[in-house]
Amino acid sequence: MNKPISYYVPYQINGDGLMNEIESEWGSYFERLTGSEKLWLLARVSRELWVWFADELDCREGVMTAASRFHQELTPDARLGILVALCEQLKNDD
């Protein structure tokens, strides 16, 4: 079951600021974004976080090789599942 944005990002509902603008424009479940827009935002935020933590990142060759094979060997649903799994794991990393 989907959860609203406020479940994941704490902010004052009906207040001012970016998160309230996002909820007002795109819906509290991102329901007014297209699939393409959601993927674009996911890629953009992921890249910004990756750059932010770049000095801490060290990516093994095997990880890069596997990632380059995703589009050839995995369905779009499987790739989306990998994104969800990675996000869940990242939330639990401390």
Image (cartoon, helix red, strand yellow):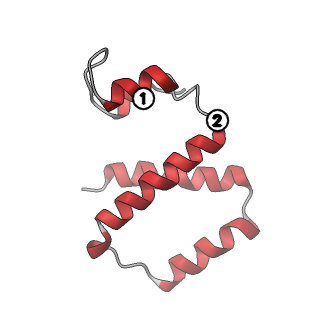
User: Is residue 28 something that shows in the picture?
Assistant: no
Q: Amino acid at mark 1?
A: Ile
Say what amino acid the circle numbered 2 marks: Thr
Instruction: Give SS at disc 1.
Output: helix
As drawn, is 15 to the left or to the right of 60?
A: left
Q: Which residue appears at 27% of the width and 22% of the height?
A: 16
Labels 2 and 1 touching (C-beta < 8 A): no
Q: Position of residue 53 (x, y in %)?
A: 29, 66
- Above or below, 75 relative to 1: below
Mark linked to residue 34: 2
- Label 1 sits on residue: 22
Question: CA separation, marks 2 and 1?
Answer: 14 Å
Mark 2 or 1 closer to N-term? Answer: 1
Q: Nearer the viewer, residue 66 or 37?
A: 37
Structural crowding at the residue carrying mark 1, measured as other residues with C-alpha within 10 Å and reported as few (<14), some (14–19) or many (≥20): few
Q: Position of residue 28 (x, y in %)?
A: 46, 22
- Residue 89, percent from left and from top: 40, 53
Residue at horizontal 27 percent and vertical 75 percent from the top: 55
Question: SS of the residue at dot 2?
Answer: loop
Tell me the crowding category of disc 2: few under 14, some 14 to 19, or many 20 or more residues within 10 angstroms, Cα based.
few
Q: Quadrant of residue 94?
A: bottom left
Q: Which mark is residue 30?
A: none
